[in-house]
Image (cartoon, rainbow, N blue to C red):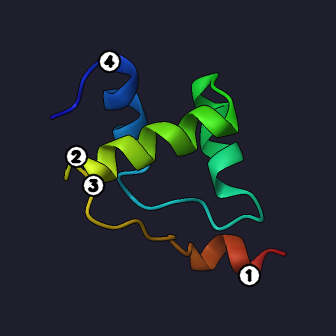
Amino acid sequence: MIDDALDRRLMAAIEDGLPLVSRPYAAVASSLGMSEASVIDRLAALASSGVIRRLRSEEHTSELQSH
C-alpha cells in the first residue's frame, strides 16, 4: 500500500523507468523536490512492502542519439 501523496508522486515519476543518467535517484529526487537519500529510502520501503517488485531504466533512443 502506498502511504501518502509523496509516495504516489514518486511512483508516478518512475512509472516509465528510472532516467538513464549517472545518478538516476538524484534526478528523480530533483524533479520531486526531495533528497536523493529520501527517494532511495522511500523506494526501499515500497519494495519491502511489496508495492514495487523491480526497477528498470528506460532508454530513449532519440536522447541517446543526440549526445
Q: Quadrant of residue 1?
A: top left
Under tag 4, what secondary structure? helix
Q: Nearer the viewer, mark 1 or mark 4?
A: 4
Residue 11 is situated, as x and y percent measured from the top left of the image, at 35, 41
Which residue does the numbered mark 3 point to in the structure image?
Answer: 52
Which residue occupies the foreground of this view, 15 or 50? 50
- Amino acid type, callout 1: Gln
Q: Quadrant of residue 13?
A: top left
Q: Are marks 1 and 3 in contact (CB under 8 Å)?
A: no
Question: Which mark sits nearer the N-terminus, 2 or 1?
Answer: 2
Question: Which mark sits nearer the N-terminus, 1 or 4?
Answer: 4
Q: Nearer the viewer, mark 4 or mark 3?
A: 3
Residue 51 is situated, as x and y percent measured from the top left of the image, at 21, 48
Q: Residues within 10 Å of mark 4 (few under 14, many from 20)?
A: few
- Amino acid type, callout 4: Ala
Which residue does the numbered mark 4 point to in the structure image?
Answer: 5
